[in-house]
Amino acid sequence: MIAFLIKRLFHALLVMFVISVIAFAIQDNLGDPIQQMVGQSVPESERAELREELGLNDPMLTQYLRFAGNAARFDFGYSYVFNQPTTAVIARHLPATLELVAASTFLIIALSIPIGVYSAIKPRAWLTRFFMSVSIVGISIPVFLTAIVLIQIFAIGVSWSPFPADTGWGTWLNDALSTDGGMPAYGRGNPVHVFGTWDTNFASLEGLTYLVLPAISLASIMLPLFIRLIRAEMLEVLQSDYVKFARAKGISMRRVYFLHALKNTMLPVITVGGVQIGTLVAYTILTETVFQWPGMGLMFLNAIERSDIPLIVTYLMIVGLIFVITNTVVDLIYGLVNPTVKLTGKPA
Amino acid sequence: MTDSSHTSSTNTPSAGTSSASAAALPALPGRWERFRDSYLLYSFKRDVIAQLSLLVFIALVAIAAFAPWLSPMNPYDLAQIDILSSELPPFWIDGSDPAYLLGTDAQGRDMLSTILYGARVSLIIGFGAVALQAVIGVSFGLMAGYLGGRVDAFLMRLADIQLSFSTLMVAIIVGALVKAIFGSATFSTYAVPLLVVIIGLAEWPQYARTVRASVLAERSKEYVDAARVMGLRSKRIMFRHVLPNTLSPIFVISTVQIANAIISEAALSFLGLGMPETHPSLGSLIKAGFDYIQSGSWWITLIPGAVLVILVLSINLLGDWLRDVMNPRLYKG
């Protein structure tokens, strides 16, 4: 166990080292900090002095070590645009993204497990076929398109009248096919302040309405994947001897499915889920762009547009750190939950 | 075009790299008779969904390839654009102009033409990126699987790191950096090759992993031992002996990867890190139209969106079918 832990931690540190080298290379090669600090009018001699003072003429290794040392203390310098420490800017945008991710994770878990289990238990039911066809279509729809369609239907509204409006049933069908819209689809509204930089959308009903469409969009990309994964794993588990034995023993089917089979189904789901967190962060960039949700993804895109190099570098480092931590934790949890994984130094 | 490639026995899977038309689906090595009696064709004939998807896919590739001849106007030609006819709806809505079948966008470009040209750009980038991924991923996967040891550990660690970031994230970051280095103007000029490189670099690990897994299985077989005993060089064994036996998983993931590459390109373009609006792909059309959705002009964004979904869906369905036929346990091992 200790050996496994040390190996994983070493791996995590190695990845962080690679990320920091990339981040350092970006900082070093893109943009001129002097230019950003003093602008055009300052004479060359003064620039050279400032350059020397900031240590920009030092050897590469010294500069990298300084960068890494500062990074270890979460000091990434000042954002050009906001004129604040970049970490403060990130801290202001982080809660919005985390709340969005939390809401869609909730949706994914709450929907994928029942649907996945159902379609494994009843592989031939028409509802299963429906879920499976929807899920392959879902995989093929990019997340920003789902978001746009949701905006069109629920925020702007659709009026469609293919049936004659002068008859009672026609009006009823037309109404059923049309939507009023009106759901908020821009920004976060007025989130309730909790503490520090954390404002929450979960505290009020109004806040939740702002969260609904972005969360559904973000969940839509993962949901098909998880439904298919849970179904496939569950189908496999249901074939195994211990399930047959439990069934033969006369344990109620409900207990077999949800206690015995589900446990082993969830093992691979944990690993895949952990890896997908990375993908989820990437998709927050897209979702936040569509809904102008003031989170880290939108901030990152704006930083790219304005060439705010320190902020870009900070974002990379922090997102990298989040990835590394989740991957390590997922690996450890998997090792702890699954007794067949040997927690020794040897690769599986 | 797919049929003709089957009849020629000399075609190689890597022949149709950058051109959209040549890299179309199953280009199995082998003669026409062998193909005719194969299980592949047998199951294709029985699978309506696969037939439909192939039909839709070939139709889309064809209209994209012949876009300059099919489309009513050239969306790149500023002289043909009339700003006065902007935001016209498609033909089934009141107020449409019969000259513009699917309406016009905010600049007055004919939607049908921009979509045809856009699909062309999307497909070129998709196929190009997958060709690049295949070259990088297959060679790395072969090296990792066949040579083993440190090479294997290093390459697979690299793939792990990149995959843990997710391919889209890597593509976004690399795209952002490339754009920052080259500047917007240069980036727009060379957007197609740059996007091919960005998406190709972001997604090679999928190939490398798949190839490595099947190389590991092949390596322990007797014919490889025999080749080694005969004194052949590793390079020759890798490319001439092992590689041909790992082709079917490569085909299977190629279809999925083309769909992924097209979606990645659309996502990058939607974020403003891809094709410029003057030379749009489906993704940049969606982005351009999104600004006008609030004013009620939904067709500018949703029609290209629908085309994108149909294109990706047809490829995904084909990939599903191919995976079932060729290697049912590919994604399980």
Image (cartoon, helix red, strand yellow):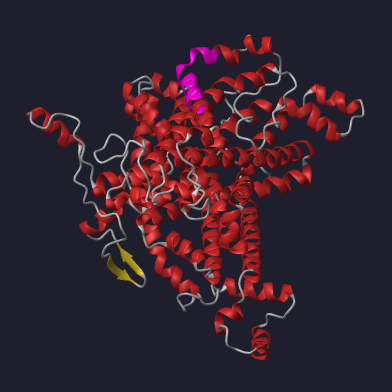
Depth check, front residue: B293 or A231: B293
Whole-percent x, y for residue B3 in the image: 61, 18
Examine the rendered structure and indicate whether residue A165 appears above or below residue B82: above
Examine the rendered structure and indicate whether residue B115 appears above or below residue A28: above
Whole-percent x, y for residue B126 in the image: 57, 40
At a point 65% along the width and 71% down the height, the residue shown is A28
Is residue A107 visible in the rendered image? The answer is no
Depth check, front residue: A256 or B8: B8
The secondary structure that most of the magenta stretch takes on is helix
Whole-percent x, y for residue B139 in the image: 74, 39
Depth check, front residue: A220 or A117: A220
Depth check, front residue: A199 or A249: A199
Q: Where on the picture, by quarter, is residue A309? A: bottom right
At a point 70% along the width and 37% down the height, the residue shown is B138
Magenta residue span: B43-57
At a point 87% along the width and 28% down the height, the residue shown is B228
Is B48 magenta? The answer is yes
Drawn side of residue B26 relative to residue B154, left or right: left
> Image quadrant for the C terminus of chain A?
top right
Examine the rendered structure and indicate whether residue A168 appears above or below residue A72: above
Is residue B185 visible in the rendered image? The answer is yes
Drawn side of residue A264 relative to residue A181, left or right: right
Is A204 magenta? The answer is no
Drawn side of residue B30 relative to residue A141, left or right: right
